[in-house]
Image (cartoon, coloured by chain):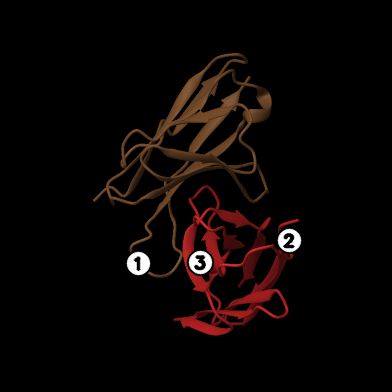
Chain colours: A red, B brown
Amino acid sequence: GQSLEQPSEVTAVEGAIVQINCTYQTSGFYGLSWYQQHDGGAPTFLSYNALDGLEETGRFSSFLSRSDSYGYLLLQELQMKDSASYFCAYPGSARQLTFGSGTQLTVLP
Amino acid sequence: NAGVTQTPKFQVLKTGQSMTLQCAQDMNHEYMSWYRQDPGMGLRLIHYSVGAGITDQGEVPNGYNVSRSTTEDFPLRLLSAAPSQTSVYFCATGTYQTGGNTIYFGEGSWLTVV
């Protein structure tokens, strides 16, 4: 079947680095995306990996290994405002996204 | 530029009532979709469309209908509301014209069925 697995919760302190892992199982693969969602808000796009390797966007980076069916989101220099839920997702052939269940990140002062 | 607009933002329905959640976009995106998100859960795809006149089912389509008569609008109809449909509903759009895989979400519609 098709699925994505990610940890349900991660806690880190302000200024630290945190990595959120995602493993997936899918019959067709069109890349791995990451979305951020604050409480009561809409998901917003963070990053997308179509190929193996690291994509960097400011303090956020995302990594993909297609041979391992694995990816991660790396958040550096954590700030309080980074406390949110983070979802990995993969698209189908028509861009319809399947989401993981989300990782709740809590940043402590 | 409004982006993706969902209405209503909040709605309370009685079991058995029907209603339509509206989604409008002004970005000329081909792709539109509806997700539901239950408390503490991820987003589950209900229906999606790759262009006007074309719709397809997602992971949880039962109890919902959609149509796509124009590029801009993608309404979601609840035929006979049930308490299990209490959720937050998100409309999301995307384009095939550029590279990448970004989809853009509306602000959500909070639906309670009593």
Using the rendered view, name the quadrant where residue A92 is placed: bottom right
Circle on res. A81: 3
Q: Chain of mark 2?
A: A
- Compared to A84, does B3 lie above or below? above
Position of B77 with respect to B23 (left or right) is right
Amino acid type shown at disc 2: Ser
Q: Residue B98 got which mark?
A: 1
* Residue type highlighted by circle 1: Thr
Find residue A52 and report its horizontal and vertical position in percent. Answer: 59, 83
| Callout 3 secondary element | helix
Same chain for the residues under marks 3 and 1 in the image: no
Asked whether A79 or B62 is in front, the reply is: B62
Taking the spot 59% from the left edge, 17% from the top edge, the residue there is B80
Name the residue that disc number 2 marks: A8
Q: Residues within 10 Å of mark 1 (few under 14, many from 20)?
A: few
Mark 3: which amino acid? Lys
Mark 3 — on which chain does it sit? A
User: Residue at 64% of width from left, 38% of height from top?
Assistant: B60
List x then y, in percent, for residue A3. Answer: 72, 58
Q: Label 3 to label 1, Cα distance in Å?
A: 30 Å
From the image, state whether disc 3 or disc 2 is nearer to you: 2
Query: Chain for mark 1?
Result: B
**Real-space Cα separation, disc 3 to disc 2, in angstroms:** 19 Å
Find out whether the residues at labels 1 and 2 contact each other: C-beta distance under 8 Å.
no
Q: Quadrant of the rendered structure where residue B14 is? A: top right
Q: Nearer the viewer, mark 3 or mark 1?
A: 1
Q: CA distance from mark 1 to mark 2?
A: 33 Å
| Residue situated furthest bottom in the rendering | A53
